[in-house]
Image (cartoon, rainbow, N blue to C red):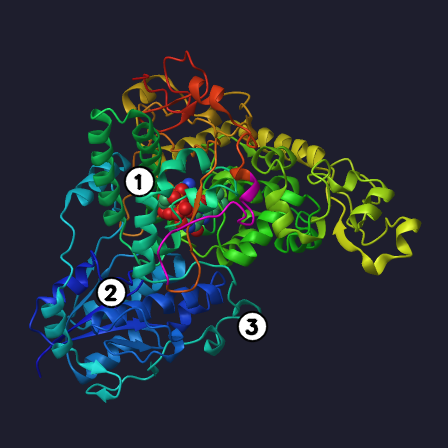
């Protein structure tokens, strides 16, 4: 029997810049394009119904492209019968074994994946099966991450090499026609029989492995698929991206000024290389425009796109961490912190539940959590603030909050998620502490409470004066604004972790008309006190010699490699300096981690995905820079319908409307004149006379 090829689709559901699809479209060999709903992977506690819906939208989009059908169909995706993609609800090894029994597989073509531990073991099992059965498996790179990276110094070199490679050719109509003729299994015409074949996308409700409470969708999430991804990139590069660096911090402005590409990158509806290349092209055009004396708009565009490009690189930088140390998913990067938040009594179920449901009594925190529940997306700073509140103020273990956030994030990407969680929780050992003052964040990022009123409707009548601290309202004000603040702390403990009593504080004058009132909780903890206690606990660990040694290893393994000549010769990591300086994250900018002296001998810390040899050298850290200035005037439809063209937002748009009015926002022209963006790391420095970047120490150009 003639051997066949299998294209195994995983987190790469697109046609453009897709190596395996490009290669088989040029090959005469018969083939199968396979997508698997894998029971073992779906049992992972991070899976949510919204992820499956998004994947399904991508699958339908791709199937329509492969079968040469018009994409503008208005039918539900669940009415779609797969024409070209073979979709099965079975495990990977089982599927390959079953195909191989009926027709020998010559080659499995797929993309390399840096996933969580379960997908890592699945990949190992597939590779073992391939070896045992003489089947070639060809895993192509789509992220610029290096497997078996021996030396972290090589990361950037390899990443740039990956970017320099030409993109894969997109199969044209004739090639697609030929490809369809070589396809072996199409539903209804089964030359090969596969157990668990699905003729239409599998609904989350039909997936047994997903717990009932996680099968639902998110009403305002982004719609999946390559067509949507491309149109969102287009709108970003033609309109929205101009305000990127100024609008990234506020949940109001970031909604439109951030690229919103993350779920498409995560599920592979668009390729990283394509996004970077298109951005580069736009940058070239802008530089040309600048030469022709169109300075001002080109400057803000160029600044924004430089910032955006950095983040595209950080994506792979972070994923490389998980690739090089898969245990980050389960263990603290710096083991010296592993006892923290894990002592008997540390985990408070009531706090956890209140945080999960957006009922902690701090309106800005609650609004962010509820926005995530509804939309599956929020900007970086708000994610960091949610983690800070959970891990410092509520003293919750990052491992306990990780699955909840993973289910909430439509863009859940293990390689970014776990390193970021640990960074925000302060367990990497190489980053400064990031403890957010949530009240101040609210006042800075949502001064008028527009965002709060949208997502915490209980507070919709509350005046701006009290919107960030509704618990300070008198009984008569509560009556006036028709909201009852309930569950006052019964006693204050020395650690600020007061017991959450529900409901005890109810003014008599309000009680009588209680039914007409919305209810909103009193803050479940004292923010200032809990932050202080937590910072003291972390500081005590950071100061220990053992921690510094441990941090050194982490740094060597995972730090980024910018400005190495300056960094390595002079600066020691924060964790290894005495009296670690605390960072006030609420100033809008994250801390600098400077690099380690390379002369220190690196010690291996944990196993890599591919090699046993872990003498990996590493350096600096890339931190995130947020900056706030003005507002984005446009809004794009990220929603579930298939109409993908960007639209101008009328002034009355919810959430962001009041921000369109000039002068409402925190920053003004004076600030932007005095600040400057670092050309190397894009950090927005606010010291006008500084000669070097506060973030990465590079000389100001
Ligand atoms: C605790 C925590 C968990 C996070 N988990 C995820 C996750 O699971 N998946 C995810 O994609 N992002 C994650 N992020 C990073 C960041 O918040 C999102 O990438 C960003 O908000 C996505 O929106 P965007 O596409 O509009 O981003 P943009 O600002 O437009 O950035 C473009 C792309 O750059 C990459 N990027 C941006 N910021 C970062 C960053 N800090 N680190 C690495 N890559 C970055 C993303 O791929 C993003 O899509 C997390 C951040 C925190 C604080």
Q: Which mark is residue 471?
A: none
- Estimate the spatial distance between the alpha carbons at disc 1 and disc 3, rounded to whole Å: 37 Å
Q: Which mark is residue 212?
A: 3
Is residue 484 rendered to the left or right of residue 314? right
245 in relation to 20, above or below: above
Report the image quarter containing ligand 1. top left
Question: In which quadrant of the rendered view does residue 88 lie?
Answer: bottom left
Crowding at label 1, few (<14), some or many (≥20) Cα neighbours within 10 Å?
Answer: some
Are the two marked residues, 1 and 3, in contact with CB atoms closer than 8 angstroms?
no
- As helix, strand or loop, the secondary structure at mark 2 comes to helix
- Estimate the spatial distance between the alpha carbons at disc 2 and disc 3, rounded to whole Å: 33 Å
Give the number of the mark in front: 2 or 3.
Answer: 3
Residue 445 x, y percent position in the rendering: 56, 36
**Magenta segment boundaries in residue numbering:** 643-658
Residue 449 x, y percent position in the rendering: 63, 41
Seen from the viewer's position, the closer of residues 9 and 151 is: 9
Is residue 625 rendered to the left or right of residue 135? right
Is residue 298 rendered to the left or right of residue 408? left
Task: Name the residue beneath numbered marker 2.
Answer: 127
Is ligand 1 less than 8 Å from the beta carbon at label 1?
Answer: no
Counting residues from the start of the chain, the first of labels 1 and 3 encountered is: 3
Crowding at label 2, few (<14), some or many (≥20) Cα neighbours within 10 Å?
Answer: some
Residue 650 painted magenta: yes
Task: Name the residue beneath numbered marker 1.
Answer: 313
Magenta-highlighted stretch: main secondary structure? loop
Seen from the viewer's position, the closer of residues 226 and 544 is: 226
Residue 450 x, y percent position in the rendering: 61, 44
**The C terminus: image quadrant:** top left
Please report the residue visible at 33 percent of the width from the left and 82 percent of the height from the top: 199
Counting residues from the start of the chain, the first of labels 2 and 1 encountered is: 2
């Amino acid at each position: 029997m003639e051997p066949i090829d299998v294209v195994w689709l995983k987190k790469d559901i697109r046609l453009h810049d897709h190596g395996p699809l490009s290669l088989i479209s040029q090959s005469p060999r018969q083939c199968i394009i396979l997508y698997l709903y894998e029971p073992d992977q779906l049992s992972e506690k991070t899976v949510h119904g919204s992820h499956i819906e998004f994947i399904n939208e991508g699958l339908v989009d791709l199937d329509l492209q492969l079968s040469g059908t018009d994409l503008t169909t208005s039918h539900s995706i669940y009415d779609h019968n797969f024409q070209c993609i073979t979709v099965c609800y079975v495990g990977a090894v089982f599927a390959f074994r079953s195909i191989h029994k009926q027709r020998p597989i010559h080659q499995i073509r797929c993309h390399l994946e840096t996933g969580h531990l379960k997908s890592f073991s699945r990949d190992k099992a597939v590779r073992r099966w391939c070896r045992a059965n003489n089947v070639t498996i060809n895993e192509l790179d789509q992220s610029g991450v290096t497997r078996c990276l021996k030396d972290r110094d090589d990361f950037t070199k390899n990443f740039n090499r990956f970017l320099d490679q030409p993109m894969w050719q997109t199969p044209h109509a004739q090639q697609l026609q030929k490809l369809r003729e070589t396809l072996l299994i199409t539903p209804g015409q089964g030359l090969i029989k596969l157990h668990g074949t699905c003729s239409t996308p599998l609904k989350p409700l039909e997936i047994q492995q997903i717990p009932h409470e996680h099968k639902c969708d998110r009403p305002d999430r982004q719609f999946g698929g390559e067509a949507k991804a491309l149109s969102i990139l287009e709108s970003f590069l033609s309109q929205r991206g101009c305000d990127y660096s100024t609008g990234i911090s506020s949940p109001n402005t970031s909604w439109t000024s951030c690229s919103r590409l993350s779920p498409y990158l995560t599920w592979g509806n668009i390729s990283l290389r394509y996004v970077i290349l298109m951005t580069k092209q736009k940058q070239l055009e802008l530089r040309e425009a600048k030469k022709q004396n169109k300075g001002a708009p080109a400057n803000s565009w160029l600044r924004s796109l430089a910032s955006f490009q950095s983040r595209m690189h950080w994506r792979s930088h972070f994923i490389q961490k998980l690739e090089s140390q898969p245990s980050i998913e389960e263990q603290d990067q710096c083991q010296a912190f592993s006892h923290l938040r894990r002592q008997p009594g540390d985990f408070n179920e009531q706090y956890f539940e209140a945080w999960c449901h957006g009922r902690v009594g701090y309106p800005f925190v609650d609004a962010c959590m509820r926005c995530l529940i509804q939309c599956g997306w929020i900007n970086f700073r708000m994610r960091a603030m949610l983690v800070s509140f959970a891990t410092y103020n509520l003293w919750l273990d990052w491992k306990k909050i990780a699955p909840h956030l993973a289910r909430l994030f439509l863009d859940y990407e293990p390689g970014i998620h776990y390193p970021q969680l640990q960074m925000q929780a302060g367990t990497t050992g190489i980053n400064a502490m990031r403890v957010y003052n949530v009240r101040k964040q609210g006042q800075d990022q949502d001064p008028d409470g527009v965002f709060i009123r949208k997502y915490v409707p209980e507070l919709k009548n509350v005046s701006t004066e009290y919107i960030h601290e509704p618990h300070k309202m008198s009984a008569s004000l509560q009556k006036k604004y028709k909201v009852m603040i309930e569950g006052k702390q019964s006693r204050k403990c020395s650690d600020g972790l007061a017991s959450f009593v529900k409901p005890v504080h109810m003014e008599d004058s309000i009680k009588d008309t209680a039914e007409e009132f919305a209810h909103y909780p009193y803050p479940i903890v004292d923010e200032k006190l809990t932050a202080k206690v937590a910072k003291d606990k972390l500081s005590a660990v950071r100061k220990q010699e053992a921690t510094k040694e441990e941090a050194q290893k982490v740094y060597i393994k995972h730090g980024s490699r910018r400005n190495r000549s300056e960094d390595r010769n002079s600066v020691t990591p924060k964790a290894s300096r005495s009296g670690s300086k605390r960072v006030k994250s609420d100033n809008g900018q994250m801390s600098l981690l400077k690099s380690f002296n390379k002369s220190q001998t690196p010690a291996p810390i944990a196993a890599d995905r591919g090699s046993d040899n872990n003498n990996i050298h590493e350096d600096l850290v890339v931190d995130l820079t947020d900056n706030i200035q003005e507002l984005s005037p446009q809004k794009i439809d990220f929603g579930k319908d298939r109409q993908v063209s960007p639209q101008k937002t009328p002034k009355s748009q919810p959430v962001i409307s009041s921000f369109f009015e000039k002068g409402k926002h925190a920053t003004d022209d004076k600030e932007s004149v005095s600040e400057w963006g670092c050309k190397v790391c894009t950090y927005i420095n606010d010291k006008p006379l500084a000669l070097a970047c506060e973030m990465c120490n590079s000389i100001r150009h």
